[in-house]
Image (tube, coloured by chain):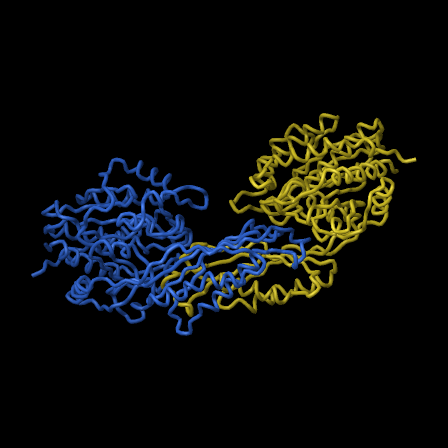
Chain colours: A blue, B yellow
Amino acid sequence: MTARISDHVDGRRLWRDLIELAGFGATDRGGVCRLALSQEEIDARAALVAWGREFGLHAAVDPAANLFLRLEGLEPELPPLLLGSHIDTQPTGGKFDGAYGVVAGLAALRAIAASGLRPRRSIEVVAWMNEEGSRFAPGMMGSAVFTGKRRLEDIAAVRDKGGCSVREELDRVLDNERDLQQRPLGFPVAGHLEAHIEQGPLLEAEGRTIGVVTGIGGKRTFRVVVQGQAAHAGTSRRAERRDALVSAVAMVDALQRAIWDEADTVRFTIGMFSVEPNAPSVVPARVTFSVDLRHDSDEVVRTLGDKVSVVCQSARGKCDVTVTPLLYDPPLEFPAAIRARVRDAAARLGLSQQDLPSPAGHDSRYLHYFCPTGMLFIPCKGGISHSEDESITPSDAEAGVRVLADVAFELAGQA
Amino acid sequence: MTARISDHVDGRRLWRDLIELAGFGATDRGGVCRLALSQEEIDARAALVAWGREFGLHAAVDPAANLFLRLEGLEPELPPLLLGSHIDTQPTGGKFDGAYGVVAGLAALRAIAASGLRPRRSIEVVAWMNEEGSRFAPGMMGSAVFTGKRRLEDIAAVRDKGGCSVREELDRVLDNERDLQQRPLGFPVAGHLEAHIEQGPLLEAEGRTIGVVTGIGGKRTFRVVVQGQAAHAGTSRRAERRDALVSAVAMVDALQRAIWDEADTVRFTIGMFSVEPNAPSVVPARVTFSVDLRHDSDEVVRTLGDKVSVVCQSARGKCDVTVTPLLYDPPLEFPAAIRARVRDAAARLGLSQQDLPSPAGHDSRYLHYFCPTGMLFIPCKGGISHSEDESITPSDAEAGVRVLADVAFELAGQA
């Protein structure tokens, strides 16, 4: 009979840790601004290390500043099981996106420690570096580098809006954590489990507690640069202007029409749109905007993505336009065996559940190609995420940890 | 017979000063970024003070950081004549917008000093504080406060994007210039002359050297704030989004159609457009954009300006919108007597000339309601301004100063 590690989950401590972690980078409106590799994140990492040490976890860090908190197993030479997510947030993010998965992992290990049982394999909580990608684009940098999808040298050169590089900030974080054990990138791992808030409305709408994530939808992103010419707002005639904003607005409008789907299954977002010099009495010289396109069907993602450059060129007017593809992640499906374990654990605990896909990307995307990987979701209020209004309930948070703890102990016990 | 001060204008020194001044805040692409009350402007002001002291000008400053360089007249108790413009620039501005008028004033005083003649009234070169309004909006702050159009307390509270206030920066500038004579706001003046680059294509197209400015066109400006709600780009459905960028783009499109004029005489510009949180994978929560509307006809400016709020409301979709009127300046006409003096001086010097209006605003707008005011233009290449590509010729620059010097000496000699 399988041990019920879940009986030892401390829901109150879990909630206290979630709220305390949200204090690092707390905003006035109840959200969190804890950008990747920022001082706020450094402080939050120190708190995680301290919380882990309270019950004997060993902290380690790799060259990409992925942070590991290890519960030693009975056979420490075996590749460990990872319970990973991230603690960086969007600029006006919420308390739970990413943070829940890391704190849930910590709570699961605390439950195992409290049970008096020891897993065969070691289990490690991981906080992957820069999942969000809003300070340094694109996101999921830590998991991409760990799994060999990207090279450390390439991400190191990325700079934020203020000109600060990932290299500089990595050095700062790693210097601050020089006393932790140093780990290589890409060491062998037995599997990866990620608990996360749904960031969508399905579980809440259906009144279910646990989402068994079937896979992650496809995604393509682009950067569009529209080049016009600065001119005086009072003197230059419309006919002689090369107004980058006018052309960019025409492109956005044309893209919306080209990508429109009646069924509302395509996720199309222009989240970043920056104007230069951005002064009221100067005709804009340049606009840079992002295109984010997602769908469960690889064919839809590919077909619509192929339109982006064509549509922007046709709507460019008197300006020049450059469309740069940044990322193409095809849809993926998690292994049936792990999904079944999540489903069974929830059933044993009497928790309502359903299968559902993740339209959002997660670090589990890159781990999936590296080791057996699975995800579970808990509901979030109104499906709202990437927003200061993000909200979950303590009982859902605890339920997710109970499933996670039981599945983790099972997987770590396997040969 | 009128003295020919213009014979003493030193064209080479004029050009050297223009190029040297452009070194304060020089950009890589040949332009200037010398924002109002910045360190670059503080350094440039110190250079102006030093250049004036070389030939006996006395420097003074008022509480709005308007900088005065005075050539003492024979009757120093009489209100002085002012030769004013500004030395702050747009973020990617050129070498000559504003700077030309200040350096031309200095060159005119240098010519008077070199002539051995002395004017009856004192003549002062003025660098008005924050004409451009791109760091602290709206612009023409120094002249507005000096002439009583606005109150110092009100402009002092304005903050830049970084949260820094006009008050803080005024204190910094005034502390740096504490050794200069302190002047009150709004002291009596005999008149105001402003030399400026045309910032339009007419003089160049007609092959003329001097523009006799008939007046300044009307202008209305607005700030539009579109409030939606942040959401996750991967999970939130189009139907449930309140995307501030989608609504703002619809407003810009609707405004363009509502304000379109076949004759291309209306100047309509959206120069500032800022998105929050401005992250690729977050549905925009808020967009703030500027509307700048100008025309020679007061009726056109009023009628079209009245449409802005109505059009934005009708295009707001699922977001909220607030339209705040910032500025309404009706068209104005400079006194015929001053225009005639500019015209006559140019004719005596054998310089080609034409009357033309200024669609752009200038400090002379506010001085016009305070004292007899006039302006003269010199050509600028391609009519391009508010751009790093701004360009004028040394001979046009010198011609403008010759007219300015003769007219200034005439006006200062009057009872």
Q: Position of residue B99 (x, y in %)?
A: 68, 39
Screen quadrant of the N terminus of chain B: top right
Q: Compared with residue B76, is residue B240 higher up or lower down, i.e. above or below?
A: below
In which quadrant of the rendered view does residue B56 lie?
top right
Can residue B255 be seen by looking at this rendering?
yes
| x 30%, y 44%: residue | A64
Q: Quadrant of residue A337?
A: bottom left
Query: Would you identify the image quadrant in which residue B405 lies?
Result: top right
Q: Position of residue A255 (x, y in %)?
A: 48, 65
Kindly give the residue lying farthest to the left in the view shown.
A1
Image spot of residue A340 (x, y percent): 17, 65
Relative height, residue A115 to residue B121 (above, below): below
In the displayed orientation, state which residue is furthest to the bottom: A262
**Residue at the image point whose x is 25% and y is 49% from the top:** A126
Residue toward you, A262 or A5: A262
Which of these two is toward me, A135 or A257?
A257
Q: Is residue B205 left or right of residue B45?
A: right
Q: Nearer the viewer, residue A148 or B368?
A: A148
Left of A327 or right of it: where is B51?
Answer: right
In this view, the residue in front, A222 or A336, is: A222
